[in-house]
Image (cartoon, rainbow, N blue to C red):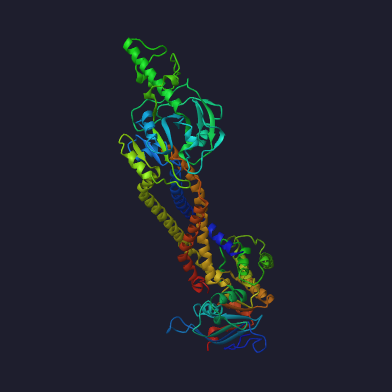
Amino acid sequence: MVNDATATAGPAAGGGERPALAIEGLRFRYGADGPWIIDIGGLRLARGEQVLLTGGSGRGKSTLLQLIAGLLEPTSGSVRVEGQAMHGLRGAARDLFRGRHIGMIFQTFNLLHGFSALENVMAALMFSSIPRGEHRRRAAELLHHLGIERADADPDRLSVGQQQRVAVARAVACDPVLVLADEPTASLDPENSATAMELIQQIAREKNAALLCTSHDPAMADRFERRVTLEELRA
Amino acid sequence: MTDWTIITRSLTARLFSTVTTVITVAVAVALLLTLLTMRDAGRRAFDRGSGNMHLLVSRDASPLVSVLNGVFYAGSPRRPIEWSKYEQLARSAPFEFAVPTQIGDNYRGNPVLGTTPEFFTRFQPVDKRPWAFAQGRAFDKDWEVVLGAQAARATGLRLGDKISLTHGAAAAGDGRAGPAPHEHQQFKYEVVGILEPTGSAHDRALFTSLQSAWIIHAHDRREREEMAEAGRAGERPAGHEHETAEEHAAHADTHDHEHEARTTAADLVEGDRLITGIYLRLIARAGSDAPANLPQVFDQLRRDTSITVAQPQQEIGKLFGIVSSVDKILLGMAVVVMISSGIAIMLALYNSMEQRRRQIAVLRVLGASRARVFNLVITESAVIGFLGAIAGVAIAAGGLVVVARVMKRSVGLVIDAGLAPDVAMIVMSLTIVLASLAGIIPAAMAYRTAVAKNLKPMG
């Protein structure tokens, strides 16, 4: 199923529950007179909803995810995560909010080298409100759940597929309301891509987190009920 | 997983860089600590020794040499003072004490001071701290010897041991004329006392009665006279094969003397009664250490051109004045080395930043604030400083022991080689502060790391 072009309403968008993600009039460009990289009228994702954002390389998919995560400042418009205006938060408050409410998965995994798989997951928990005493157990259980048996291994010693699982575990360790996955299968072969995407979607469902996934892999399209392009979202 | 885990992993991930930087800091800290400690310890060591004496009289070439020889045993005075001169000087002013001393003999390289019992009862090597005996007592007759604390340790002698002193100068190394050192086996001294340490140069000396030293001098004189007489008569004294007095003196400790009769106090003549220094203290009012007539007596004694008069405290002050410029240069160099070590820390962290941008970006994505990332780098820098400071203190502690030994051996200065805890703490604290400051630029780089840019490729 393909959403309408503006895609302003998700399954729960009209309900009383706050959406996991609500974007309104979001515009972004580099400099004062550059072309608009992002120009979105609106986008809403309910808790548990999964959306695939497609489009060619360099069209601004990653930029949109960075705006949502509060890593870039929009030129105008707003991004709300579970009702909280991301860009209304400043400095450490925004960083902390991101750490606790948004999970990010990257194409290159961006695991911390020199730290074990377990420590990579625990690194995410460092910034959560979860008591420190529970971090190790929680991280170990999550890795085990995702099929990582060698939790103490350095990620460099794990297969690419296992590294992706560690990255997924880290993204969902804090029970986020929103998972942003930026080309999460681009580094994987087709077989592993399917497995990895299945894993990401499954864990997002288990955590009842909204999932916004970017990809230019056509094979991914069938995995999502809701699919949008940046062009469709344009205001 | 804590901030500390991140810091330690970062340090161990680039172990070679960390270790070399820590070593750089450690060397700088050790250098600074050694210089500071030696400066203070040196001053303390020089302040000790002259104790409660006001004036020192000798016939050395200058007042400073007089103090170095007479108080710190740096060398043996060349020109003695006759006993009659001592008696005249001792009566010349109202002195609380006028302790005669004679330096020139040694035991296994430790200087021997011939003196009178007043040396122990009136003179105090450290002002307001009288001599204290760890064992035994002061000598009260000839052929008894008291050991300084360090001399006792160095020689291993105990109460009741019998020793022979080496008569004549120990290896002075200045090429001066004088009798070659030789041992008089027939004159045995008994160890009757061992002193508590004073921290002064006296700790490495042995103390005997003046008369004992005079008798040995007299013994040598008689030998020379006998040989001269025998030479005139065309025969040699019994038991001797030496051609000349010089040859006799040079036979050193190769055999015992076997003169027909042992020399005693009865054989002393005026020419044997020689001393090399006089410790003088003027009568001062109770509670005061600066008698009003000190300048007047000092000037009066200085008018006597046959003697050298020194005010030990002033001479020590002058000595420190001479070396203070060198002292400042050395301290300046140590500070420069410290700053260099700070730069080394900064460079090590700065270079690592390029490799760590992605790690920092990931931590930011996970929820670390800019301030937290900044603090991580500053703390890492401070940890390098702390490790360097600890290693530096250890190196300095070991180095000071070595330097103290060298100082004792070369100039006879007994230096307290212990690191002052407050100085060590101050230097360590400053090192950590300096290291933290050195971390500011790398930390600022971490603070400004563009997260989005450093997470690429993202699609």
**Residue A182 falls in image quadrant:** bottom right
Residue B417 in view here: yes
In the image, residue A90 above or below residue A116? below
Residue A191 in view here: no
**Name of the residue lying farthest toward the top:** B234
Q: Nearer the viewer, residue B416 or A32?
A: B416
Compared across the picture, whether B458 is left or right of B92 comes to right
Percent of width and height locating residue B13: 53, 58
Number of callouts in the render? 0
In the image, residue A133 above or below residue B244? below
- Tell me what residue is drawn at x 65 percent, y 61 percent: A150
In the image, residue B426 above or below residue A180? above
- Tell me what residue is drawn at x 42 percent, y 25 percent: B214
**Residue A41 falls in image quadrant:** bottom right
Percent of width and height locating residue B81: 36, 31
Percent of width and height locating residue A233: 55, 86
Q: Nearer the viewer, residue A165 or B414?
A: B414
Percent of width and height locating residue A8: 59, 88
Q: Nearer the viewer, residue A143 or A159?
A: A143
In the image, residue A175 above or below residue B105? below
Q: Nearer the viewer, residue B369 or A161?
A: B369
- Tell me what residue is drawn at x 35 percent, y 19 percent: B245
Compared across the picture, whether B430 is left or right of A179 comes to left
Compared across the picture, whether B246 is left or right of A65 comes to left
Q: Quadrant of the N terminus of chain B?
A: bottom right
